[in-house]
């Protein structure tokens, strides 16, 4: 006996309900036609990683996907299928709920996705990143810079709204904290349980004045956070996996942060399209 309800059979299309062009919801002729109107595509990439007891392990990937959809709605860019898994920094490994993909695998996988999208006619490819793995993604960009003629950019959302994050948040942005939880409340509030939000603090190996975080950098210069083994393993230092104070998060803060990132990335895409309309050559193919 088939007990599947009619509601269970329904697929709620993103394209139908939000007006966003999702590549995986379109037929190949529709994709081909779209590239003639707008040859920009966004590749959301995040990770499957613990984000405390109060937010889902897919937070980074969900942030990338939801921010990409907001950008696409304003610019008519297409959203590619998201890359859910990502590379982890050394200190993030071993925490239950986190799945680490080797950095070289993530890089090569992303390169294949970009190659494929370029062949489809997307000549402006924006990797919408929501996880601390920039060194991997930038490696893919530079490898492909001499191989394909599409324009490629890595857009890590907090790079576009760092000042806003620092202004609206009462505590520094690190991980699963006030800033990230606020963004989650803005983008998918039903998956956030603020009754389980926590505040935790770690002790770095070297003083914080020598290395930066996602939205802060030492005033007198120092190391980017991903370029120094400055912290202990998170699984040994944080009982709940919150690197900061998630209790201070609010949906209002998240909306302000997200709006700033979406506006600035959308502005850049409009600039690209105005300067280089679909069909316009941006870069010449590299020749030895």
Image (spheres, helix red, strand yellow):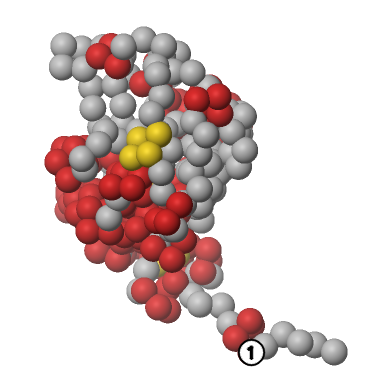
| Residue 183 horizontal/vertical position (percent) | 32, 52
The answer to whether residue 99 is above or below residue 279 is above
- Report x, y in % for residue 113: 53, 44
**Which quarter of the picture shows residue 244?**
top left
Assign the N terminus to one quadrant of the image. Answer: bottom right
Against 45, residue 278 (above or below) is below
Say which residue appears at 56% left-offset and 28% top-offset. 235
Q: Quadrant of the C terminus?
A: top left
Residue sitting nearer the eye, 189 or 68: 189
Pointer 1 residue: 6
Q: Nearer the viewer, residue 276 or 53?
A: 53
Residue shown at 63% from the left, 89% from the top:
6
Q: Where is residue 165 shown, x and y percent of the image?
A: 21, 42
- Give SS at disc 1: helix
Q: How many marks?
A: 1
Report the residue at 45% width, 46% height from top. 60
In this view of the protein, can residue 223 be seen by the observer? Answer: yes
Q: Residues within 10 Å of mark 1 (few under 14, many from 20)?
A: few
Q: Say left or right for 223 vs 108.
A: left
- Determine if residue 75 is in view: no
Is 219 on the left-hand or right-hand side of 44?
Answer: left
Q: Which residue appears at 35% of the width and 58% of the height?
A: 185
> In terms of depth relative to the viewer, which is nearer, 124 or 8?
8
67 w.r.t. 207: above or below: below
Quarter of the image holding residue 112? top right
Which of 45 and 150 lies nearest the eye of the viewer? 45
Tell me where residue 101 appears, x and y as whole percent.
61, 34
């Amino acid at each position: 006996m088939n007990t599947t309800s009619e509601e269970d059979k329904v697929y709620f299309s993103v394209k139908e309900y939000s007006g966003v062009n999702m590549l995986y919801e379109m037929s190949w002729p529709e994709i081909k036609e779209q590239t003639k109107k707008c040859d920009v595509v966004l590749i959301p990439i995040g990770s499957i990683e613990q984000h405390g007891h109060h937010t889902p392990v897919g937070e980074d990937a969900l942030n990338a996907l939801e921010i990409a959809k907001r950008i696409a709605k304003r610019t008519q860019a297409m959203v590619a299928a998201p890359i859910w898994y990502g590379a982890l920094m050394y200190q993030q490994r071993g925490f239950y709920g986190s799945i680490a993909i080797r950095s070289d695998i993530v890089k090569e996988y992303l390169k294949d996705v970009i190659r494929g999208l370029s062949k489809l006619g997307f000549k402006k490819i924006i990797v919408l990143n929501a996880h601390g793995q920039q060194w991997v993604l930038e490696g893919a960009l530079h490898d492909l810079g001499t191989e394909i003629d599409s324009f490629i950019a890595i857009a890590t959302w907090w790079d576009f709204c760092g000042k806003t994050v620092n202004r609206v948040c009462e505590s520094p942005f690190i991980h699963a904290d006030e800033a990230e939880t606020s963004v989650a409340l803005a983008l998918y509030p039903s998956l956030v349980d603020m009754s389980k939000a926590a505040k935790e603090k770690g002790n770095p190996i070297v003083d914080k004045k020598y290395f930066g975080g996602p939205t802060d950098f030492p005033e007198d210069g120092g190391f980017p956070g991903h370029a120094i083994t400055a912290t202990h393993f998170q699984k040994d230092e944080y009982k709940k996996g919150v690197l900061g104070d998630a209790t201070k998060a609010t949906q209002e803060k998240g909306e302000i942060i997200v709006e700033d990132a979406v506006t600035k990335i959308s502005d850049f895409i409009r600039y690209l399209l105005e300067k280089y309309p679909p069909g316009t050559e941006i870069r010449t193919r590299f020749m030895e």
